[in-house]
Structure formats: structure tokens, C-alpha cells
Amino acid sequence: MGKRILLVDDEPLILKGLKYTLEQEGYETESAMDGEEALDKFFEQPYDLILLDVMLPKLDGLSVCQRIREHSTVPIIMLTAKGDDMDKILGLEYGADDYMTKPFNILEVKARIKTILRRVNQPHTPAEEPRIVRVRDLEVNFLKRTVTLAGEEIRLTAKEFDLLAMFVSNRGRPFTRKEMLENVWKYDYTGDARTVDVHIRRLREKIERDTTKPEFICTKWKVGYYFTDKN
């Protein structure tokens, strides 16, 4: 059975084009044309990925994303209007893994979907790392792609886990924003460092007890971020 993708957009031609192209690639698709219908379908059955437009009738895409994140870490790619940077940043703040700007190239859509699904469903465990890494009371399971803190599971999005896995695999090494974009996102983000900063902030909110005094993800002044395993 192919991976299931929920397509959410209020433009019939866009839905038709996405549905045709993705089904040719072997994906199963469902469509929704407004935010309420999207949530109804999300709660009816599981999906492997969601393509979600920001501008939707009845309930906007940002609200839909926020509601979904209360229940699931399914990968979400937001579709935003060209040049609307605020929607991109808000989408990431609300838990989206990625965003694409309309009008988009269908080949790039397919490439990003494949990249996300490959990383989520075929997790790579670095050869130099064990399958489970523990740093104090933080535990990262590379195979199951799960994280626990003080015995409680922490729900991370696909990108948040990929960032944490990169840090944990390179403890003590500072990464620039450009390096993080290249290592985690794998494609050109036109140097938008805010994408990294938003994900770091969300990750800290989930694994740090006090985000003003981080225990795990620290800032390297004028460089970027690094993970520390020192007490």
C-alpha cells in the first residue's frame, strides 16, 4: 500500500494537478477544500504526510496545523503565497515541518515529499552512534525516532527530531545556520536563517526545563548552536 497524503487547498486545479502527479508516483491521496473538511478527514484516518495551504475557507491552514499538532507529529508541508514571509514563519511556529511558495514546481514538491518520507520512515542511525543515546535524563532513540525526557515521551515533528539527532550525533560541535539547513533540510532555503531559529526555539521549548538557561542546546555567539552533554 502506498503512502497516504492529505491534500488541502481551495483551488480545484491545484488539487487536481497534485492528485494526478502524486498518484502517478504511487501515493494514495485524499483531498479537502477547506479547513474544517481537512480536520474531519485527518481524524477519520491516518496519513503519512499533509500538504496544507495557508489560505483556506472556514478555518485557515495555520489553525488546522495547530489543531493537528495537538494530536499528531505527521509531517506537514505548508503552501504559502509568494513573498508572504509572515505565513512561512507562523507555519513553522505552529508546527509545520516545511513550507513551499506558490506557484511551485511539481518536481520540487515530489522531491520534498520523498525526502521527508524517507527520513521519517527509514531512519538512519549514524555508524558511530548506538541506536539509543542518553544524555542525563534525555533519551534519543534513533531507530524508533522517539525522545523521552525524565521518562516522559516528548512529541517532536520530523524536522525537530532530525535537528536533535544531528546535535546528539555531534555533541559539542557548533553548527552554523547554513550547515543546519544543508544537513537537515537538504535543499536551498535561500539563506533564510529564521527557519532554523524557529525550529531551535520550538525544540528548546520541548526539551529544556528553562529556555533562558538551556541544558542541552546552547548558543555559540556569532556562530550558531551546539549540543552539550556536560552538566
Image (cartoon, helix red, strand yellow):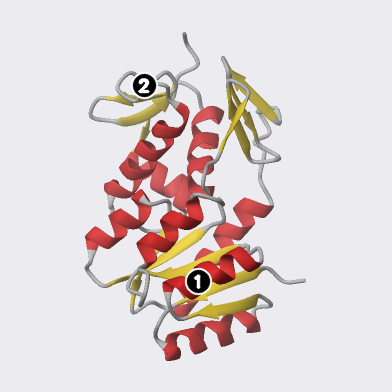
- Dot 2 falls on a residue whose secondary structure is loop
Q: Position of residue 139 (x, y in %)?
A: 61, 25
Spatial CA distance of label 2 from label 1 is: 35 Å
Comparing 158 with 178, the one in front is 158
- What residue sits right under mark 1 in the picture? 38
Q: Residues within 10 Å of mark 1 (few under 14, many from 20)?
A: many
Residue at 45% in and 33% down: 206
Is residue 137 visible from the viewing direction of this image? yes
- What residue sits right under mark 2 in the picture? 210
- Dot 1 falls on a residue whose secondary structure is helix
Q: Is residue 35 left or right of residue 141?
A: left
Residue at 34% in and 25% down: 211
Is residue 174 visible from the viewing direction of this image? no
Name which residue type carries label 2: Asp
Indicate which label's residue lies in the foreground, 2 or 1.
Answer: 1
Q: Position of residue 180 (x, y in %)?
A: 41, 42
Name which residue type carries label 1: Ala
Q: Residues within 10 Å of mark 2 (few under 14, many from 20)?
A: few
Q: In the displayed structure, would residue 142 be above or below residue 28?
A: above
User: Which numbered disc, 2 or 1, marks the residue that appears first in the sequence?
Assistant: 1
Q: In which quadrant will I find the N terminus?
A: bottom right
Residue at 29% in and 22% down: 212
Q: In the displayed structure, would residue 52 be above or below residue 73?
A: below
Comparing 33 with 11, the one in front is 33
Residue at 64% in and 36% down: 126
Picture quadrant of residue 97: bottom left
Circle number at residue 107: none
Q: In the displayed structure, would residue 102 be above or below residue 68?
A: below
Q: Position of residue 186 (x, y in %)?
A: 47, 54
